[in-house]
Amino acid sequence: MTKIKAVITNAPDGGVSVKTIDAERSNYKVLLSPIYTGVCGTDRGIVSSSLKFAYNPEGYDYLILGHESICEVLDSKVPEFKAGDLVVPVVRRPGDCVNCRIGRQDNCSDGKKHEAGITGMHGFMQQTFADDPEFLVKVEDKSLKEVGVLTEPLKNVLKAFEVFDTVSKRAVFHGKDSTVLGKNVVVIGTGCEAFLYTMMSRELSFNALMVNRHPLSEKIMKIFGDLGLRFVNYAEEPESQFSAGIDLLIDTSGDPTTVFNFLRKVNYNGVVILFGTNGKAPPGAFTGADIDYIVERNITIAGTVDAAKKHYIQATEYLTKWHALYGEKLENVITEKFPPENTAIFTSRQKDEIKSVIEWK
Amino acid sequence: MTKIKAVITNAPDGGVSVKTIDAERSNYKVLLSPIYTGVCGTDRGIVSSSLKFAYNPEGYDYLILGHESICEVLDSKVPEFKAGDLVVPVVRRPGDCVNCRIGRQDNCSDGKKHEAGITGMHGFMQQTFADDPEFLVKVEDKSLKEVGVLTEPLKNVLKAFEVFDTVSKRAVFHGKDSTVLGKNVVVIGTGCEAFLYTMMSRELSFNALMVNRHPLSEKIMKIFGDLGLRFVNYAEEPESQFSAGIDLLIDTSGDPTTVFNFLRKVNYNGVVILFGTNGKAPPGAFTGADIDYIVERNITIAGTVDAAKKHYIQATEYLTKWHALYGEKLENVITEKFPPENTAIFTSRQKDEIKSVIEWK
Amino acid sequence: MTKIKAVITNAPDGGVSVKTIDAERSNYKVLLSPIYTGVCGTDRGIVSSSLKFAYNPEGYDYLILGHESICEVLDSKVPEFKAGDLVVPVVRRPGDCVNCRIGRQDNCSDGKKHEAGITGMHGFMQQTFADDPEFLVKVEDKSLKEVGVLTEPLKNVLKAFEVFDTVSKRAVFHGKDSTVLGKNVVVIGTGCEAFLYTMMSRELSFNALMVNRHPLSEKIMKIFGDLGLRFVNYAEEPESQFSAGIDLLIDTSGDPTTVFNFLRKVNYNGVVILFGTNGKAPPGAFTGADIDYIVERNITIAGTVDAAKKHYIQATEYLTKWHALYGEKLENVITEKFPPENTAIFTSRQKDEIKSVIEWK
Amino acid sequence: MTKIKAVITNAPDGGVSVKTIDAERSNYKVLLSPIYTGVCGTDRGIVSSSLKFAYNPEGYDYLILGHESICEVLDSKVPEFKAGDLVVPVVRRPGDCVNCRIGRQDNCSDGKKHEAGITGMHGFMQQTFADDPEFLVKVEDKSLKEVGVLTEPLKNVLKAFEVFDTVSKRAVFHGKDSTVLGKNVVVIGTGCEAFLYTMMSRELSFNALMVNRHPLSEKIMKIFGDLGLRFVNYAEEPESQFSAGIDLLIDTSGDPTTVFNFLRKVNYNGVVILFGTNGKAPPGAFTGADIDYIVERNITIAGTVDAAKKHYIQATEYLTKWHALYGEKLENVITEKFPPENTAIFTSRQKDEIKSVIEWK
């Protein structure tokens, strides 16, 4: 038995602490240690007890947190990995439904999958842990030691665009020149996921606009500006910003009223991606005229959660590109690093935060 | 000039009357005369002035009504059609957008298409009219002289299933045996479109259930029962009816509160088809928890309107099959026939109505 | 133990005989007895030992033949089936590859599936047999007691059209009016599968033409003619028959020279379905100019074998329709019925044969 | 009138010369000047008169060559472009078929499209030329002044992968973990297109292998090696190289015998992309057993030519990434630069050539 430090909660009751745990680390295929683990709204929701679907692994009275990570291989007993490799472990682990059977547990049909650090499986906020090679994604570009922690949130974006790609085939979505040049994406929200959706939308040649109902700090505005991203505070900006309509609306807020507000600007054959969740958001009013609007315009609304291993790989490819092009400007998105002991980052969002991470030595 | 009788309105101001019109009928490719024209909610909406998007053809101060029809060819100057042929004319006529350019004006991207009897083009409720062969669908089965009037409403159903087919590919929708056996479709509503959605769902091997919030008359129950369709009055029936969840929810009511009520029962990877419209329906409340539900379950919601010529053809094929199997039991769905002069049928739904039609001699 | 009569071979060595076998029939979920079993080229290939991939079930020195059948349920211990039900058993049984796992053993990725009457699993040419409800397709229309035996060959056609549907999405295949009206299908061959491909092509609104390099007997011509199908003896007919080119070419012959001959008439974005197999067919010559033709025209060639349970269900739906419309004219396709003892039908194609079947009392 | 230098041929008779032409350059939307124009097999085929489909523009007795290029904007009268912008002009220009109508002239259904420098439209090997903004793709990354000339050949690869993506959906192509890790791509050929197919295959996580039937020079081996690409001389290498089978076979040779040789190693559900053309290649023999192999394994073979504007944009994105990662190692793929006057490069492939380009001052 080895003593390891871990960040734990008691799901779904919540709370957070750093604890030293006795762990069995002699019987493994691949032994890992995290370099950075990211903190996101889901972690905070579990800690605050607002995410009632979280639960401890069977036989445990605690849950080790952490699903966003970039890890180093300490030792490997399989040929695919060797000590020193950078890897990102996959969060969702399959059950036996028809989607889980083919590696698409992100589309689990019966809810019997597990999620590291969330539902019934310990997460990655522990000094060392063992994992199965099947669930590890190698990061070939060693310079991603830091921004590689964005692989996990970015993989969600890539799955969402896979969904968009599928559902938008119901009509001709592209323009008369076969491209999406001139098509408008509006991303609701300005957090890390909103940022990544905006980066990806631009990468795919859309006009991309991030919106929020308040101004951003100078620091955040500079980070977005350095990367060439556009932001609008819609509480102040004139409607003319949206006069050409929205072709693809992406929500990371989970707030019905805001979603409905922008949905009413979506163009014919437009697509709405619902990604953000906020279980406590107040109800929004949706009228018969709104349904009429969706029907008459052949609009599609798609909820999307998590992603498959293939999207993790795609995410590392885009991070490799963006890091090569933007370097430090991309690294600035990791706005602060904390030691594991600083559990205060789980109880409130940090000032000027895009992505806060825990640094594991 | 020929004098013809026509049923007209003044869009979007509404009203309805039968009028004798001077019409030019010497210069045509195909000359048609309707056998039956169906009356639906859209016609009544135009007459009552609640559908504000309706408008008269350019240069006219009236709009001839009628988009559901089965017609007879009186004369043809093209080889594809000959006198005596049964045809159904296509309702939507293309503009120049990227979808209209390939015959998919049902997915018109800029709203510049026209719709016979609705937006800027005279409809089929007139004794004779000329049309272009490109927009005529031949009905090979001459025994469909009556139920062929269901081609137009059924084509909407076939487009909706095309949409379902496309969007459901985002995950594995079918069961472990490759089929949809045991998958549940709930159709909200009991009008003609709801009836056709239910017929088609069963045809595709789904468990199909029609629901409404009130009981149906004995007459209607008998018609549905003769065809083997299932109905539930959800205002009275226990929740257990829906305990297995809904895999495909189809709404023909346009009522947000009802849609949201059933949406909360939709299974993982489920699909919601929004087809019904009711611009005057009161708002429904949609909460953050509802968005959460859609996101976590990868649910897709698709508005769908109209259909393409290919769906008219498919519709005639299914009607041919159903008519061969059910005969008079299918014909009973046409619950009453009226002369053109009886304009009262435009101002209120008839008692025990599934489909009311106007009979043209 | 029960004594049952069965038609057996010794795969892959071949031969055929009728034998009485001691069989365990007390422990079953569903007990079945065939009404008719069809005989096809695969059966004859096994018997003549030309299909080297056939093999006996593990532990047996013989293989019971038969994969085309319509059966009656003798007894059932599961609620989905009851005595007297008509069923068609699925031929392929899954292994554990990524396609088998989701009920698509027709697309088996590793060859480890089994096929009743062909590879490692006893077939349906035995007086009684037990099966799992998961692999039984119910035939609701009791009037299909006879033509229901076409379900199995027709299911192959439906899978092939699924393949066509998928691959043809690489470009706009349909015409400017959204339909395939005026698009030409040429089906090479005049056997039962060719017949079913032609029926289905017409059902989907194609111009369908069956071709062979010899004339057909009057009897066969009458059967096809009664069903309104078109045939051309291309050894005699002028090229003008194909002057508009071929949009969808379907081969049931397996003969390279014939396939290449027609392939050179395929239109831009055309699709070629390879379905027929003839391992002994002599080589055809394919030149650089032929590859050039395929490249420059964006042509797709797709091999397709077997089908999934969903296609069996679709097949019963089309047979129900066609039987309702054509009645005896469809039944005539079953050109002769034999007792099990007449094993001569396995060694040569019968005169004027479309489909020969064995009748089981 | 302006005097400009141009490289011309007389299609389809062939020949090549540099000529000074009087050209009208006062009436334009965007005025361009090429920086580099690439020379490929198509140019050489036109010059040698082996490509009989090439023809001069209407009213001209010559054809200006050149379809691969990277150009500079000299002047622009539209806001989308300004002097100094880098652009790649699109080669194919639309006719009025159903694919051309939506910007997919690469899938032209009737052959009535035009191709710059090939069929009925002057190409880009001229000192200045005017073009329409609709057909210009902006290259944002100014460091691509040189390798941007690979945009045109790379766009073909991206269309081919779009085709692969569509046709491979007919079954589950990916592995049990949702990825293509461990899936093998074999690219036949070692020219520029083969090189780009191999780069892209690796980018998409395939095992990628380039093959040819002769050894490569040390210089070429070093260029491929520096980029981490794998090559096998299959005339010498043991069969074990292909023992795991081929999941995606890509041909750039156009040689039937070679294609058939590798086709017989393709796995279940495998895909074959035919891209290379060699109208003079001798016939290969294809037997009944080969057709059987394609059928039983559900193999798909897809010819693919050209690409849409969207693929040009994707190509610039991948070149941006690869150039950022590999720098000079990528630039080395442009193996030699020639002045326009050196027309010898049109009559034979250069020693150690991957891509030869003409440098325009």
Image (tube, coloured by chain):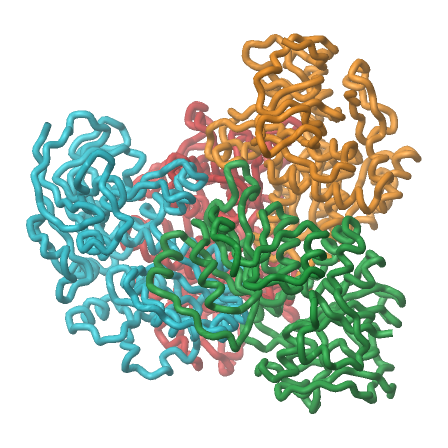
Chain colours: A orange, B red, C cyan, D green
Q: Position of residue B255 (x, y in %)?
A: 57, 38
Count of all numbered marks drawn on residues in the image: 0
Q: Position of residue B13 (x, y in %)?
A: 64, 56
Q: Which corner quadrant of the image does residue C119 belong to?
A: top left
State the residue in front, A152 or C314. A152
Q: Which corner quadrant of the image does residue A331 belong to?
A: top right
State the residue in front, B344 or A136. A136
* Quadrant of the rendering where the C terminus of chain C is positioned: top left
Vertical comparison of D316 with A193: above or below: below
State the residue in front, A168 or D151. D151
Vertical comparison of B167 with D265: above or below: above
- Taking the image as shown, residue D360 lies to the left or right of residue B50, namely right
Q: Position of residue C255 (x, y in %)?
A: 32, 67
Q: Position of residue D203 (x, y in %)?
A: 65, 49
- Taking the image as shown, residue A263 lies to the left or right of residue B68, namely right
Q: Is residue B8 visible?
A: no
- Taking the image as shown, residue D358 lies to the left or right of residue C45, namely right
Q: Residue at x 28, y 69 (%)?
A: C229
Q: Residue at x 28, y 63 (%)?
A: C280
* Quadrant of the rendering where the N terminus of chain C is positioned: top left
Q: Residue at x 64, y 77 (%)?
A: D114
Q: Residue at x 38, y 34 (%)?
A: B182
Q: Is residue B326 visible?
A: yes
Vertical comparison of C236 with B277: above or below: below
